[in-house]
Amino acid sequence: MEFETKVAILVLDDLATWQKLNVTAFLATGIAGAAPEAMGEPYVDARGRAFARLLGQPVMVYAATAADLARAHRQALERGLTCAAYVRAMFTTGHDAANREAFRAESADAPDLVGLAVRGPRKDVDKAVKGAKLHS
């Protein structure tokens, strides 16, 4: 099945493994929250127990350099893509309100991004993530 939209998450390639996983999880929830129409139906196991809904399309995760992140950020904003961002300063906070304060303190034109998630038309997302490599 080919989707009209694409979800891509770029994560700085030199982070510790726990940081990469943490950033990816936070960014995925950002896209889910911003695009509830992208959510699939609830999952139900063989005993009828309900499980939470997941994004209804694949999420591509890329290992990115700082330059890849800056380029994707610029492209995403220029193309009007849905964005979720994670900046390095957020690693030093302990709760959501502090994360928002840390994010707001960043330069609007050149934040210290360690992760960025984008969602939008497939071709626009592809152009935004151009140059980044799929995470292995």
Image: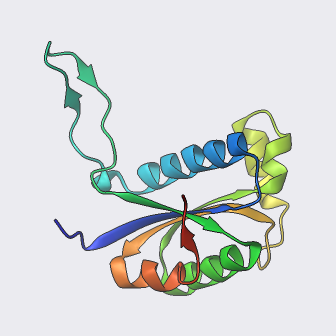
* Residue 70 drawn above or below residue 105: below
Residue 122, placed above or below residue 56:
below
Check the image and name the residue furthest to the top: 47
| x and y percentages locating residue 73 in the rendered image | 63, 76
Q: Residue furthest front?
A: 136
* Residue located at (49% from left, 50% from top): 28
Q: Residue at x 33, y 57 (%)?
A: 58
Q: Is residue 127 above or below residue 17?
A: below
Name the colour scheme: rainbow
Dividing the image into 4 quarters, which one contains the C terminus? bottom right
Q: Quadrant of the N terminus?
A: bottom left
The image shows residue 18 at horizontal and vertical percentages of 70, 39
**Residue 82 drawn at (x, y percent):** 48, 68
Residue 41 is drawn in which quadrant? Answer: top left
Front residue of this view, candidates 8 and 73: 8
Residue drawn at the location 47% of the way across and 75% of the way down:
81
Which quadrant of the view contains residue 121? bottom left
**Residue nearest the viewer, comparing 81 with 133:** 133
* Nearer-the-camera pick, 78 or 125: 125
Percent across and percent down for residue 2 are: 20, 70
Residue name at image x 37 percent, y 84 percent? 123
Q: Is residue 104 above or below residue 121?
A: above
